[in-house]
Amino acid sequence: MAKGSRLVFILVPLGLTVATLVCLALVWGAGLRTSALQSFYFIKADTSKLNADPTSNQAVTDLFLKFLDSARTSNLLADYYQVDLSSYCTGKEGKSIDFCSKPVANFWFNPVDVWGLQSSGLEDLFPKQLQDGLHTYQSVAHWMYVAYVIAFWSTVAEAVIGLFATCSRLISLITSLVAGVASIFVFAASLTATILYSVLLGTFNDVLKPYNIHANLGKPMFATTWLAVVFSLAAGFFWLFSICCCSPHSYNRKDKSASKSSSGGRWAGLRGRGRMGTGLMAERTPYTYERVESPFMGERQPMAAGHEMTDMTAGSHTGYEPYRHA
C-alpha cells in the first residue's frame, strides 16, 4: 500500500518533468522547416512592404534603400525573417518557410551578415541606437543560449533520476536538487528571452520604421517557454514533497506486532514463567496459552513418591505452644 501511494506521488512530478521537456523541445525545434512550428519564433521582421519616408538624412536613406532594393531584386532579401534560439528562417509573404539557417551555438541574428552588408560599408550607416542594441543583443543572447542548454539537460537528468525515485527517499532528494537547478535555469532563460527580445523589438521598430520594416514577438514561443517554467516549478515542488511521505520501506502496526512476536522480543525467554521457574506459558494464536518447560530448570522430572503427609485438621485441640517440654 505504501509503495502504491509513493508511486502516485512519483508519477505526478515525473509527468510534469516530461511536460517541461516537451516545451523546451519545442523551443529548441523552432528552427526546423515544418509547418507545425512555423508560428514558433522569438521575433519576426517583416520587410515585404519596404519603403522610405523622407528623413533628415536623405542621402543615407537613399543609399540604404538602393542596396535593399538591389538585394530584393537578386532574391537576397526575404519578405520576412524569423529569429529562433539557434537559427533563423525566411519565407515569402503569405507562404510557409522556405529557408532555415543551420543551427549554431551562441546564435544571434546579425542583419549586417544576413543582408550581406559587411562588404558594402553600409553597416556604418546604421543609426547608433540600432548598433548599440545589436551589440547588447549579441552579448545577452550568448548567456540566454547557455541557460537554455543547462535547462534542457538538467531537466533530462531530472527525468532519468526520477525514474528510480520509488526505490528510496535518498533518490528523491537527489532528484529534488537536480529539479531545483533545472527550474532556476528554465526561469532564467525564459526571463532573459522575454526582456531581451522586448527591448530589441522596441529598438528595431523605432529605427527601421522609416523604411516601413516592422517586427513583432512570437506569442506561441513565449507562451511555451513560460509554460515550461510553470511545469518545472511544479515538478520541483512535488519532488520535494515525495521526500517526506510514503516511504517505500514502511509497514503497518499489525505487521510490526507480528514481527515482534515471531522474533520473541526483549522478554521472550521470561514471558509466561511459571511458579518456581517450573515452566513457561507460551502464547498461541489467537488468545490461548500452553505450558512449556522452562529453559532454566532443565527437563522436568516426575514427582517422586514421598511420605504421607500428616493431616493437619482442625480436630486437634492442642493449643499452639512455641516451646513444648517433655
Image (tube, helix red, strand yellow):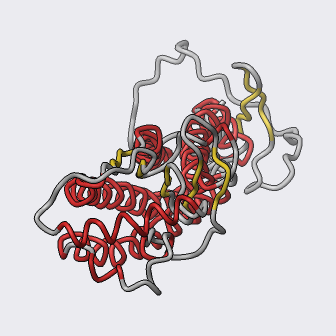
Q: Position of residue 9 (x, y in %)?
A: 56, 37
Q: Residue at x 31, y 49 (%)?
A: 212
In this view of the protein, which residue sits in the foreground, 319 or 16? 16
The single residue placed furthest to the top in the displayed view is: 315
Q: Position of residue 192 (x, y in %)?
A: 32, 61
In this view of the protein, which residue sits in the foreground, 251 or 308? 251
Q: In the figure, is residue 253 to the left or right of 117?
A: right
Q: Residue at x 43, y 72 (%)?
A: 110
Q: In the figure, is residue 243 to the left or right of 64?
A: right
Q: Residue at x 47, y 69 (%)?
A: 145
Task: Please indicate, yes or no, whether residue 133 appears anywhere in the rendered image.
Answer: yes
Q: Position of residue 176 (x, y in %)?
A: 48, 57
Q: Position of residue 94 (x, y in %)?
A: 56, 34
Q: How many marks?
A: 0
In this view of the protein, which residue sits in the foreground, 293 or 63? 63
Where is 140 relative to 214, above or below?
below
Q: In the figure, is residue 211 to the left or right of 18?
A: left
In which quadrant of the rendered image does the N terminus lie? Answer: top right
Q: In the figure, is residue 29 to the left or right of 242?
A: right
Q: Quadrant of residue 218?
A: top left
Task: Please indicate, yes or no, whether residue 326 appears anywhere in the rendered image.
Answer: no
